[in-house]
Amino acid sequence: MPPSVERRRFCRSVRGFTGAEKALLIAFGLALVIIVGALVRRGSQQAGGDAARVLREHGGSSPGRLQTVGDALHAGEMEVPRPRPAAKISPEAQDLLDAQIKSWDRDAAAQGTLKAASTSAGFTRLAPEEQVRLLAYAGGSNTAVSGPARRALQGIVGLPYFKLLGEDEQAKRLREFLTQQPGLPELVTPDEGTFDKTRESVKVKVSGPTEVPGYAFRSGKADAHRYSVEIDGKKIDVYRPKTLDPKAGITTSLEQIQKGLAALPPESLRLVRSVSVNPGQNPDDARWALQYRDPNFRSYMTADENGQISIYPTTDPLSQTVVDTTFIHETGHTLSLIQWGKPSTDKRWNGWKAAIEKDKLHVSGYGRASISEDFSESLALYMTYRRRPEMAELRKIYPNRFKILDGLIGK
């Protein structure tokens, strides 16, 4: 039968193999072992290379530090790459997020932005304090800071491209959002009508004018009219040029000034001694243009340590709310000069410098210009919202600055 025939070809004798046949079997077996070993080694090296590429593409170890499976086998040892520990949202950030999502129950867009940011893999890679800072900055209901920040955040996390990024790249984009602060308003400017109730609560009386020949405006001497604006018994002299030059720009009206002074909180009002409406541009603008690197820079208001506020012509008309907030801003310069002197030379400013570094977020675009402007913009924000519900949110964004202002102004 065929099977017997084949068996006989392989085993000529039941008594055993000849010497030559034994040698042939041994050689054949060794060849099989070598071939199988080579195939295993080649497959393991290829698998190790694939693993290295995957790790590099997804944020794993660098090629220089990665040991492929084939190399490990060749060395007689195995090094298995450790998986990254699962990151998560910190308890403080989660509590803040839950409260914000609940507060935005009628605003699907706001909820969507916060959820898109907080559920991204990149968000979980942020440090706990970064998570809280981002949510506090962009998740609040205030329109002065959080509103613009949230719209800018939506422009990042709302893009389909963002979801395709790796977690480390997502985290990088979110950190850039915190450091660059896209959407940050140029000036602290609350909603129109914010100070109307403050004005309604004070008594205002205006008298004058009295002619003052050759009054020393900062932009140069000119004949002036002096008015007396009385706010709850405090009298403030207001000087305006007798003759206005339309080519110089738009001049703030006496009515705007009276309303702006009436909007000042008592702590700011007591710092003001006089107001001068200059007929020309601030002579220091050339210096400020160099310092702020803005060739078109023009001052609107300035103030000194004596409480003398100077107003200059503008190229565009300003709303009453801008005038109101700028008056508060200028009293910040007076207050800081009284308390700490000049920031360029006085070490008493070190506490405010430290507060800026700890808060890590700017108050406004103009506040970036210098430490003194940061203080005045912070004071404008603080004074505007001090008695309003939004203040709790703003304290979470600027806790260290506001703590200092609490000491200077009082809660």
Image (cartoon, rainbow, N blue to C red):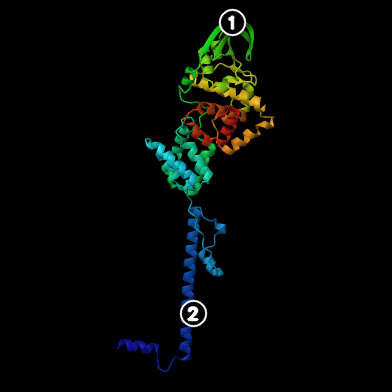
Residue sitting farthest toward the left: 1
Vertical position of residue 371 compared to residue 274: above or below: below
- Please give the label number shown on residue 75: none
Q: Which numbered disc, 2 or 1, marks the residue that appears first in the sequence?
A: 2
The amino acid beneath tag 1 is: Thr
> Image quadrant for the N terminus?
bottom left
Mark 1, residue position: 210
Mark 1 residue element: strand
Q: Which image quadrant for residue 231?
A: top right
The residue shown at (51%, 39%) is: 177
Q: Which residue is mark 2?
A: 30
Disc 2 versus disc 1: distance between alpha carbons? 118 Å
In the rendered image, which quarter is residue 305 located in?
A: top right
Residue 372 location, x and y as percent? 61, 28
Give residue 347's quadrant in the image.
top right
x, y percent for residue 366 = 56, 28
**Number of numbered discs present?**
2
Q: Residue at x 59, y 22 (%)?
A: 331
| Residue 170 visible in image | no
Disc 2 secondary structure class: helix
| The C terminus: image quadrant | top right
Q: In the image, is 108 to the left or to the right of 27?
A: left
